[in-house]
Image (cartoon, rainbow, N blue to C red):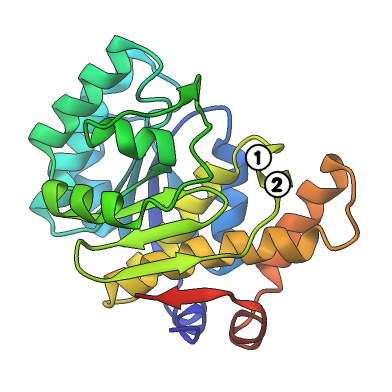
Amino acid sequence: MYKLINKVKEVNPLVLHYTNEVTINDCANATLALGGSPLMSYSYEEVEEIVSIASSVIINIGTMNSSRLNLFIEAGKAANKYNKPVILDPVGVFATKTRSNFINELLNKVKFDVIKGNVAEIKYIGGLDFKGKGVDSFDDDEDISEIIKKIAKKLECIVVATGKVDTITDGEKIIKINNGTCKLKSVTGTGCMTGSLIGCYIGACEDKLNAVAMGVLTMGLSGELADRDNIAIGTFKVNLMDTVFNMSEEKLFEYGKVEFI
């Protein structure tokens, strides 16, 4: 599994982002740091052409812009048409009725390969009780493996629930990742950047479940290694990007805390 990082650097996947303005620059840089090629677009006119050449497509609703909602749907449909892996980041889906309704529309019109969110977002999408406010989750302490597994079966895709322990499942196999640092919650965009890393791996590798797990592991471990000296968050953000850039198969193997269930 860890050697998939070499595949990303070899293939240089084109990761197409339909994402929010708050974190767009960080997502582009994280993609570049891992070895992918980022592409950002808000154009209706180029959807068909640009999706057709992409390696993967990310749809992130973090910044709800009314003029772009239909664009996200069209991009998802085009990804399905051209058989491109498509990732959904339902940021703050529980925060407003508008967000939840839009996510329901997306799920009805687009077949997603991966849905990535924090525990509260994933539980909300699955129709379960959750604890959340804004885009933040407060459900970090429970073992949600079986719950997430059921949600993955229901949605027929790989589901990622991030938290103190990150859980990834395709509805059958479960992968848990125990790397990370609480500072990842203190820097805006680390969740969005995780989506970018997933886009890099799934755009370069055929083994989708392990590709998704590697995206999550790369962010978690990079955060953990960047925070070894308990640094302030400004320095941490710089170190985080440097650590993603310097990540290797050997580091992933040596320091990765991964459980296969």
Q: Quadrant of residue 34?
A: bottom right
Residue holding disc 2: 182
Residue holding disc 1: 185
The residue at the point 76 percent across, 47 percent down is: 237
Please state which of residues 112 and 258 is positioned toward the viewer in this rendering.
Answer: 258
Residue 47 visible in the shown view:
yes
Q: Position of residue 51 (x, y in %)?
A: 24, 49
Q: Position of residue 238 (x, y in %)?
A: 80, 51
The residue at the point 64 percent across, 34 percent down is: 188
Please state which of residues 213 and 173 is positioned toward the viewer in this rendering.
Answer: 173
Please state which of residues 238 and 115 is positioned toward the viewer in this rendering.
Answer: 115
User: Compared with residue 4, is residue 138 higher up or lower down, i.e. above or below?
Assistant: above
Give the quadrant of the C terminus: bottom left
> The residue tagged with tag 1: helix, strand or loop?
helix
The residue at the point 60 percent across, 45 percent down is: 190
Please state which of residues 12 and 93 is positioned toward the viewer in this rendering.
Answer: 93
Give, as a three-letter code, the residue at label 1: Lys
C-alpha gap between disc 2 and disc 1: 6 Å
Position of residue 136 in the picture relative to residue 78 (left or right):
right
Q: How many marks?
A: 2
Residue 114's mark? none
Are the residues at dot 2 and dot 1 in contact (C-beta closer than 8 Å)? yes
Give, as a three-letter code, the residue at label 2: Cys
> The residue tagged with tag 2: helix, strand or loop?
helix
Give the quadrant of the N terminus: bottom left
User: Compared with residue 28, is residue 59 higher up or lower down, i.e. above or below?
Assistant: above
Residue 8 visible in the shown view:
no
Position of residue 253 in the picture relative to residue 127 (left or right):
right
User: Compared with residue 245, is residue 78 higher up or lower down, i.e. above or below?
Assistant: above
Q: Position of residue 194 (x, y in %)?
A: 51, 52
The residue at the point 41 percent across, 42 percent down is: 117
Q: Could you classify mark 1 by the number of other residues whose Cα lies within 10 Å: few (under 14), some (14-19), or many (20 or more)? A: few
